[in-house]
Image (cartoon, grey):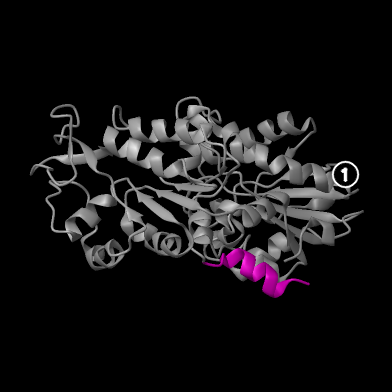
Amino acid sequence: MKTLKDFNFNDKRVLMRADLDVPIDEKTGEITDDFRLRLAVPTIKHILKKGVKQLIIMGHMDSPEGKVVDNLKMDKVAAKLMLLLGKNVYKTSDCVDINLSSLATEKIILLENLRFHAEEEKNDDEFAKKLASYADVYVNNAFATCHRAHASMHAITKYLPGCIGLQVEKEVENLDISKMQKPIVAILGGAKLKTKIPMIQKMLVQADSVLLAGAMIFTFYSANGLEIGNSLCDNDYITNAKMMLNNEKLILPKDIVIANASLETGIMTVPYDKIPKGVLGLDIGEQSIEQFKSELRGAVTVIWNGPLGYCEKKPFDKATAEIARFMGELKCHKIAGGGDTADIIHKLGYDKNFTFISSGGGASLELLSGKGLVALQALEENGK
């Protein structure tokens, strides 16, 4: 796959797809975490140093479903990029039908939210052609969306020569499990087993041990004939869970923190096989935390994807926070999947203690599961 070093950007117009989907405070409208914007900066600076005529940046925020939503406009993103780059960033009023000749003196242009047009998520060819008409070269640096066949990621590769940016290059290199040093310990959490099955199966082959937590563990307990109370269970995947239970690499928690439906009463820790009827399992207990630590101590590489409990509410965030802190102290390679996992690590302030934190949730999940990413496949197939 072509990278930035394969192109001469001198006097060229470059169209860069970036990860701009930053969280916005509903009350103030301010950006609450600029992690993804900061990850875009190295690629932007690299391109600018190569003597480009113009750099046109495009991206999306949230899912406005083809409608213009005021608090999802790119104004705050443009302002933040100006601070990070120390350069002017001109933001357009739309992302298509822009008269670039009137903006000839602007070095950096930021297009309005792509998803204000339904054609973006529909992978519409005509929409992609309009975007492609702005530039001579296309750069995909939006790893978090690489698993989506959207116009600015997929269809556009048919109309412009292109390559991946620095962040995508780092993601692909760091999430390649075949290059990771053994022993590998994978710690996987999250709510729905459905979304994690391919990754669990891949890790059961490639890793040396696979520690499971999060609400998806209750499907495994149910598959083993155990009482799980009113805990979340993916009944459609009981058979899958039964099959994976036979693998000795799979390690499930020994104790569970439970509570009543209100989440305020009946909070206690019970053995995994003594969960009462009518309660909810919301975190893993102290014994399981120590069990996981013991496994992690022997790792040369740790892969972490997904929270270990119901992190949105205390005290059910305890195991996730404790394991994040412990992992930060380990002297080994530590790879964290994006999405919720990355958010947790950043909020706890442990990000500097990890070897690599992915910028994409679903994309990192698919890559770690051994799947190809459709946007990158299109770029490689259509590469000129």
Magenta span of residues: 371-384
Amino acid tagged 1: Lys
Local packing at callout 1 (Cα closer than 10 Å; few below 14, some 14-19, many 20+) is few
Q: Secondary structure at mark 1?
A: helix
* Residue 319 image offset from top left, x and y in percent: 35, 34
User: Which residue in the protein does label 1 denote?
Assistant: 49
Residue 88 occupies which quadrant of the picture? Answer: top right
Measured along the vertical axis of the image, is residue 128 above or below residue 341?
below
Which one is in front, 17 or 40? 40
Q: Is residue 354 visible?
A: yes
Question: Is 372 covered by the magenta stretch?
Answer: yes
Which one is in front, 179 or 164? 179
Q: Residue at x 89, y 49 (%)?
A: 50
Which one is in front, 374 or 1? 1
* Residue 106 image offset from top left, x and y in percent: 83, 42
* Residue 136 image offset from top left, x and y in percent: 82, 61
Measured along the vertical axis of the image, is residue 163 above or below residue 287?
below
Left or right: where does residue 307 sit relative to residue 63?
left
